[in-house]
Image (cartoon, rainbow, N blue to C red):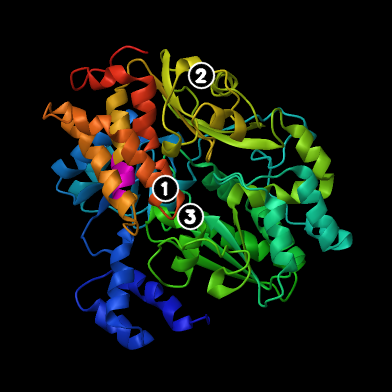
């Protein structure tokens, strides 16, 4: 497979105009790509569609708990072309809206109405720098790996130290640290590094996965806004270690402000970077599935963001068919401190598993935000850091929508990869969403099922059909249209989705419903709009 600059330009050109009538033909002429392929790529991404939408309001559970529905209704009453959208990674300052690819936080219904009357609904980039709570700010310096509360540093000390250690020793430190992928899978980082380092094929690439879209997750946005130095230095160390000459940073399309901040940080960091190391930025276009690493690679190459069949894995056949190291933002941000302080130091920070973890917490909590705590922290400890619950805890999702729902009785389970797997859930991205007894749990379930139905790429029939089946089964049960038998088949459908889907979306999409059936069966018997009692 050969790298094609024309193929890459397909999505770049479509971003200028959207998929307006005639644009597919124009782009096909300019890039020599078949018009059908251009249209296929453009129609795949939400943000490239020429739908005339002026305002998109986040429809995730944390935003709906904070008034997103009223905001959407106010926008429509005011004559704005407004639509709901998937999570905007701003759950800590909910509700969030999107204008011109810029996330706007802290906007109320009155402000929307005034802007509509004035005919001036324009993006205000400074609003995306409105940040939620972070913590702990009083932790000892040697107890944290990322330090969200500290000012960015651009001296390149860790990069210089890594150069002195040499590539094999750096990988040994990563292995000793026990660092696992912080994007959701929890895969050992050193295995990837060593595989790309030992690959013989050239060139090699390092790719940053900043396509953060899991409902309830916003930690990567906070890292990019607050500690871009950690990200850039970690990427440079990775490239230097595995022998890559190019670093590709893929940020979700809604991360316009984080991208700008990262580019400004790169300019400041440039004097200490290797002169022959090239950094390239890529914007996503609104497809959640591009958070899956192979779908992300397809998107960088200018194609529809559909996951690839594995094996081969990216470490051997990644970007443009070459060995590629793909890492999540949080994972790569841990690297500089591991290099400086040593792998055993990082391992010792964890409680039940190695290292610290950035836990996002949102929903009905007093101080929603991002907290760097020992891996294995419990929900009660996280709630304490976040100022406590608003009301009495009923349910929580420990790792975003993909982790399903757990009852309050599981609040003492360590929030780590292994412990949550044992109780049928997952840590995932550690996007913790908490719900009180006053929340409508059935509505939260529908939020998550609707999300997966809309975000399935459609490549795998079990996922494409199964996500719709599960959503319609719950909607049918609400309407009392005889959907009981359909709900009884949820476990069978979930198994088919898990076994027959190429990527993790198919496996995770059923978790909200199967977990609700297990832990909260009463919500399916209660009348619509009634939350029911716990357990």
* Mark 2 residue element: helix
Residue annotated with mark 3? 292
For marks 2 and 1, the one nearer the N-term is 2
Above-or-below relation of 398 to 261: above
Side (left or right) of 346 relative to 52: right
Residue located at (54% from left, 44% from top): 184
Q: Where is residue 78, by image quadrant?
A: top left
At label 3, counting other C-alpha atoms closer than 10 Å, the crowd grade (few under 14, some 14-19, many 20 or more) is many
- Please give the label number shown on residue 410: 2
Residue annotated with mark 1? 499
Place of residue 533 in the rendered image (x, y in percent of width and height, measured from the top left): 32, 11
Place of residue 320 in the rendered image (x, y in percent of width and height, measured from the top left): 54, 75
* Mark 3 residue element: loop
For marks 2 and 3, the one nearer the N-term is 3
For marks 3 and 1, the one nearer the N-term is 3
Q: Quadrant of the C terminus?
A: top left
Residue located at (62% from left, 68% from top): 316
Q: Is residue 426 magenta?
A: no
Place of residue 35 in the rendered image (x, y in percent of width and height, measured from the top left): 28, 81
Residue segment shown in magenta: 450-454
Side (left or right) of 234 relative to 477: right
Q: Where is residue 439, by image quadrant?
A: top left
């Amino acid at each position: 497979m050969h790298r094609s600059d024309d193929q890459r330009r397909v999505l770049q050109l479509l971003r200028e105009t959207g998929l307006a009538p005639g644009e597919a033909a124009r782009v096909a002429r300019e890039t020599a790509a078949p018009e059908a392929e251009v249209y296929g790529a453009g129609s795949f991404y939400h943000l490239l569609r020429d739908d005339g939408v002026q305002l998109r309001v986040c429809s995730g559970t944390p935003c709906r708990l904070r008034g997103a529905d009223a905001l959407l209704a106010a926008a429509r009453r005011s004559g704005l072309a407004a639509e709901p959208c998937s999570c905007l990674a701003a759950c800590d300052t909910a509700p969030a809206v999107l204008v011109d690819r810029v996330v706007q936080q802290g906007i109320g219904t009155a402000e929307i109405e005034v802007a509509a009357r004035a005919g001036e609904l324009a993006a205000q980039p400074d609003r995306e720098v409105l940040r939620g709570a972070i913590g702990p700010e009083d932790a000892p310096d040697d107890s944290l790996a990322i330090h969200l509360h500290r000012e960015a540093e651009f001296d390149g000390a860790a990069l210089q130290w890594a150069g002195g250690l040499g590539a094999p020793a750096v990988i040994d430190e990563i292995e000793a640290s026990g660092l696992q992928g912080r994007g959701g899978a929890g895969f050992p980082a050193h295995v990837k590094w060593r595989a790309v380092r030992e690959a013989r094929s050239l060139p090699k690439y390092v790719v940053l996965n900043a396509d953060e879209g899991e409902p309830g997750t916003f930690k990567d946005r906070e890292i990019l806004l607050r500690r871009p130095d950690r990200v850039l230095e970690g990427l440079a160390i990775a490239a230097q270690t595995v022998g890559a000459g190019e670093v590709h940073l893929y940020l979700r399309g809604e991360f316009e402000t984080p991208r700008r901040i990262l580019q400004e940080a790169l300019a400041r960091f440039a004097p200490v970077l290797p002169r022959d190391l090239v950094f390239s930025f890529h914007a996503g276009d609104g497809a959640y599935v591009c958070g899956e690493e192979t779908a992300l690679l397809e998107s960088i190459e200018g194609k529809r963001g559909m996951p690839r069949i594995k094996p081969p894995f990216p470490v051997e056949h990644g970007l443009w068919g070459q060995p590629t190291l793909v890492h999540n933002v949080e994972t790569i941000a841990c690297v500089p401190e591991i290099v400086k302080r040593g792998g055993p130091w990082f391992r010792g920070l964890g409680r039940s598993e190695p290292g610290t973890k950035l836990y996002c917490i949102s929903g009905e909590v007093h101080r929603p935000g991002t907290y760097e705590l020992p891996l294995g922290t419990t929900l009660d400890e996280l709630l304490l850091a976040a100022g406590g619950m608003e009301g009495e805890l009923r349910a929580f999702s420990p790792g975003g929508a993909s982790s399903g729902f757990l009852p309050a009785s599981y609040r003492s389970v360590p929030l780590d990869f292994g412990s949550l797997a044992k109780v049928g859930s997952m840590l995932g991205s550690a996007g913790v969403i908490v719900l009180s007894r006053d929340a409508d749990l059935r509505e939260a379930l529908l939020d998550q099922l609707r999300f997966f139905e809309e975000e399935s790429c459609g490549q795998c029939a079990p996922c494409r059909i199964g996500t719709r089946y599960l959503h319609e089964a719950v909607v049918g049960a609400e309407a009392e249209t005889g959907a009981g038998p359909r709900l009884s088949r949820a476990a069978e459908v979930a198994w088919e989705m898990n076994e027959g889907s190429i990527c993790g979306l198919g496996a995770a999409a059923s978790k909200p419903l199967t977990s609700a059936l297990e832990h909260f069966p009463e919500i399916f018997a209660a009348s619509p709009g009634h939350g029911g009692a716990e357990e």
